[in-house]
Image: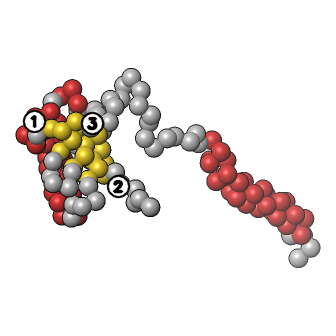
Amino acid sequence: MTAGLPLIAPLVAATLVVLTAVAGLPALLLASRQAQPRNPPPGPETAAPVQLVLGGTGRWFLNGQPIAEDALGRMLRQPRLAQAPLRLQASGRLPAAAVSRAMAWLRRQSGRPVNLDLPLAGP
């Protein structure tokens, strides 16, 4: 029984070293990761977003200018806008179903996702 006692101290020391290394591993992994922005800022390689507004009467506005729905559809299918993100702000007077239909129409016309900007509630 006493012959096994000298082996206990090195085994305990080795166990403590391994447990300490395993416990510190997540902190080491997190420290080595660089924070990456989710959406890269617009640069020369990314196009400026296309700002679309759908008014309460169903009228479309492109970057602040009124535009007919068929002209908007043609413009969204142009290859030069393939990388431009689409941002839609719908009037608060529109029902949710109308906004959903508008977003689906924009996705069909452009072939890419549409971001919905919710209007801020006024005082």
Tell me the kind of residue under disc 3: Asn
Q: In which quarter of the image is the C terminus?
A: bottom left
Residue denoted by label 2: 118
Q: In which quarter of the image is the N terminus?
A: bottom right
Relative to 7, is 59 on the left or the right?
left
Secondary structure beneath disc 1?
helix
Tell me the number on the disc at residue 52.
none
Q: Residue at 21% x, 60% y: name it.
A: 94
Residue denoted by label 1: 71
Instruction: Pinpoint residue 10: horizontal percent, then vertical percent.
Output: 84, 60
> Upstream in the sequence, badge 1 or badge 2?
1
| Visual colour scheme | secondary structure
Secondary structure beneath disc 2?
loop
Residue 104 appears in view: no
Tell me the kind of residue under disc 2: Leu
> Upstream in the sequence, badge 3 or badge 2?
3
Tell me the kind of residue under disc 1: Ala
- Give the Cα separation between the discs numbered 3 and 2: 16 Å
Can you name the residue that lies furthest to the left here? 70
Can you name the residue that lies furthest to the top here? 44
Instruction: Pinpoint residue 108: horizontal percent, then vertical percent.
Output: 14, 46
